[in-house]
Amino acid sequence: MNIVVDNFDAYVGGMVDTIVLTLLSFALAFVVGTVVAGFRVSPVPPLRAAGTAYVNIVRNTPLAVLMVLFWFGLLPNLGFRFSRFWAGIFVLTAYTGTFVAEAVRAGINSVAVGQAEAGRSLGLTFPATLGQVIMPQAMRTVVQPLGSIFIALIKNSALVTIISVPNLTKAGEDIGTKSADLFGSIVGVGLAYLVLTLPAGAAVGWIERRVAFRR
Amino acid sequence: MRKQRWLFPIVLLTVALMGAACSSKDDSPTVGGGTTGSTTAKPSFQPGSTMAAIQAKGKIVVGTKFDQPGLGQKNPLTNQVEGFDVEIAKLIAVKIFGGDPSDLGSKIEFIETPSPVRETVIEQGTVDMVVATYTINDARKQRIDFAGPYYLAGQDIMVKKDNTTITGVESLVAGVTVCSVRSSTPAGRIKEKAPAATLIEYDTYSQCKDDLLNGNVDAVSTDNSILLGFVAANPNELKLVGKKFSDEPYGIGVKRGDDVFRNFVNDRLEEIYASGDWKKAFESTLGKLGVPTPATPPAVDRYTSAGPAPAPTTTVAEATTTTTG
């Protein structure tokens, strides 16, 4: 395990990159996913169709393919430029957003229909019913699935390596190349991901207990 | 019970699809045309040698690049790999099987070996040898051995045709983005010789070239032989800076400590140097792309191997980026 000790700074640098990528894209994906989930349960057919199309197309395309498509195919033809880093964030957000949307939609559907009826009978509009009556209840039930999505995102963020954005996996590969010890460096990467994902899992459990209904 | 009526056709369809996927797998490219002459009778080898083993299994498996114009590139029309590396591999293969390089048929199989996996496939015995723009260096000699060199390339820089600011490795300063392939020798040398420049690393040089054309990177740097292939394909948009800043002797990777096989390959290289087949192979591949044929082939380096590789290590997942998601 000398390789991990010798390259400790490089591993920590990679972990910081991965944390930044994950937190930024998860925050954005949470917003995107919640809005899209709202679209998918809304009474407006075009919004429902748009939400369904986005989820079905993006969720069913491999992330690696999305990375290459976006950076090498789509971006050069769009007429404006993203930095490599923001292109990575964009793709991670778009991909993770679909999973968030489906989790949140499941949460919305888990709220008893009487709640929405009560909101309507009080004269609340659809957005108000959704935002103030349904969502606060829905979010509690989706903490665990969102946590799984978050942990998946920590690991999925490794795919920005494809477009050469620094992250933990890339750092590990660089260390492996430099030291000619691919096995050791990749074991180091695996351990470093555990250092990130295990606390993330624990944090999710803590949040879940905090927001749980007292039943 | 309705559900179960659906289940059976779905299972059938899945099985059928899996079967189709398996049966269509056997489309690995074999031998392309255009090889130079040199017919040899089927030789016999000392039992137990790698040559005898290859002859016995009736097929030599060669690792090469599939994306390097002029060296090893898969032709999408014929599904065959073509280039100087491929021709060299064939010229070695005919010494084992006899016959003519152009009709080896299924006796030679090329599999794609991108830069990061080359040592691993040799160590694990997936291939018999690697002929894949493979620079001989001491770090790699720790894991495998090299026959050759059979060509001396050098690292150079490719830029857009209208670029006048980048004139050599010394122009790769802070703020300049340079593209190369992950885990490759050229990428390492950029870090060493131009540490201020931003290094962008992709899986293939074709992605680097696309990014250069798209304006996302300022330069692409690797061996001149590879870059010349891209320049030849895009002469109106790309150019080579034309100042080598390294020597890259290309060798043929074989299992570490297999001196019998390494000597055999070295002997064969010297034979094709003398017969002119080496020159013909060069002219029919890299030469066609405008790379000048060297006046003399490089001298073969018969160094002393560090000996057989230590006990096999655990199988390493070489491509980490494809396993997530």
Image (spheres, coloured by chain):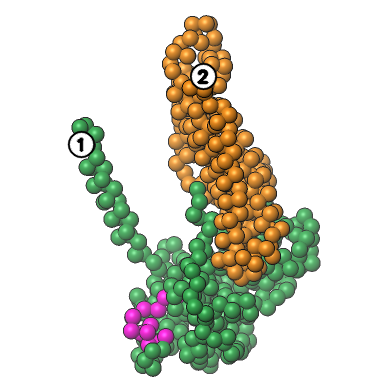
Chain colours: A orange, B green
The residue sitting at 66% across, 53% down in the picture is: A14
Q: Residue B312: image x %, image y %? A: 48, 75
Q: Quadrant of residue B49?
A: bottom left
Q: Is residue A151 above or below residue B238?
A: above
User: Label 2: few (<14), some or many (≥20) within 10 Å?
Assistant: many
Outermost residue on the front side: it is A215
Magenta stretch: residue B176 in it? no
Mark 2 sits on what residue?
Answer: A134
Mark 1 sits on what residue?
Answer: B5
Question: Which range is magenta?
Answer: B50-62
Q: Nearer the viewer, mark 1 or mark 2?
A: 2
Please report contact status of discs 1 and 2: CB closer than 8 Å, yes or no: no
Q: Is residue B173 visible?
A: yes
Where disc 2 sits, the SS reads: helix
Q: Is residue A59 above or below residue A156?
A: above
The residue sitting at 77% across, 55% down in the picture is: B175
The residue sitting at 40% across, 68% down in the picture is: B29
Quarter of the N terminus of chain B within the rendering: top left
